[in-house]
Image (spheres, rainbow, N blue to C red):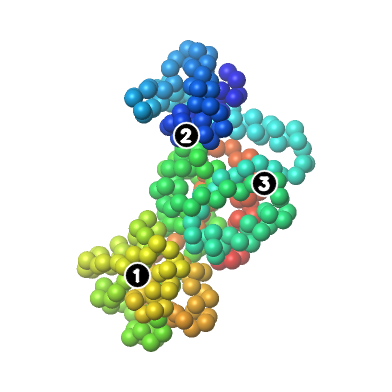
Amino acid sequence: MELRLLVTFEKVAAVMSFTRAAAELKYAQSSVTAQIRALETSVGAELFDRLGSRIRLTEAGERLLPYARQIIELSEEARVAVAGAQEPAGTLTVGTMESLTSYRLPPLLELFHHRYPKVRLALRTTIGDETRQALRQGTYDLGFLMEEETAHAGLESQVVAVEPLALVAAPGHPLAGKPVMTADLVRLSLLATEPGCAYRDLFERELTALAPVDFMEFGTIEATKRAAAAGLGVSLLPEVTVAAELAAGSLVRLLWEPPFTLRTQLAWRAGKRLPAHARLFLEQARRLVSEEA
């Protein structure tokens, strides 16, 4: 089995599309089709069921996929080992989220830009289930998660920081400076980012256990902060995202402590052999992101 055929097979299996795999590999679609057929001839079994415009792995394809991934990863590991002490190099596709990209990752990105210029970081903004699915499929090499849980099916992960949260409102809010109970919050105007953010979903879970609530939703953290500062309501956000506004006095922190803890984590597909530049990113993320927390 040729390595290039396995690389093509793994990509098609990850994205479940010959067309998309061809685009990402920069091949003509006919080349991808020919390579998959060549691999099927080599192993003596069909690897994909063609269902009109859709495809899915056959049983043989399911059995081959983990071996293909191991061979690809070992090939990369061998290449790096032979290269010896050369400068770290390679592409890393990393799932991330607005709060981390804007507020926690700049020191890490700056480090790689200046010290490891041959490591190309491709950041993809997704959250929660989307990130986990992309990691399982191999679309992402690493992914940041901000979750209460640290165990994720099909993934390995390391906690890089505990993520403090702050319930914020405009100065002069009636509850400012007073102890706040969860029951007090269900009567307030609530502001939030889109569903899927772990802190929003956990906050909603706590409140709806007492009474139905509605959130005024905003597309970004910045928009949510501005709405809160304008007196439109209260919002629960990662503390790091509102630190500047709290220091400047444009927002105040209400005296309510969330009954849950979020942990920022870096995750990757279970069993995946991380190449040297991915291990370097993980190591530096643990150091720099935790320092920022």
The residue wearing badge 2 is 20
Within 10 Å of disc 2 (Cα), the crowding (few <14, some 14-19, many 20+) is: some
Q: Position of residue 52 (x, y in %)?
A: 34, 25
Q: Earlier in the sequence, mark 1 or mark 2?
A: 2
- Tag 3: amino acid: Val
The residue wearing badge 3 is 119
As measured in the structure, the alpha-carbon distance from the residue carrying label 1 to the one carrying label 3 is 39 Å
The residue wearing badge 1 is 191
Q: How many marks?
A: 3
User: Is residue 207 visible to us here?
Assistant: yes
Q: Position of residue 65 (x, y in %)?
A: 49, 27
As measured in the structure, the alpha-carbon distance from the residue carrying label 1 to the one carrying label 2 is 37 Å
- Tag 1: amino acid: Leu
**Residue at 65% across / 33% down in the picture?**
76
Q: Residue most toward the right? A: 85
Mark 1 or mark 2, whichever is nearer to me = 2
* Position of the N terminus by quadrant: top right
Q: Is residue 49 left or right of residue 123?
A: left
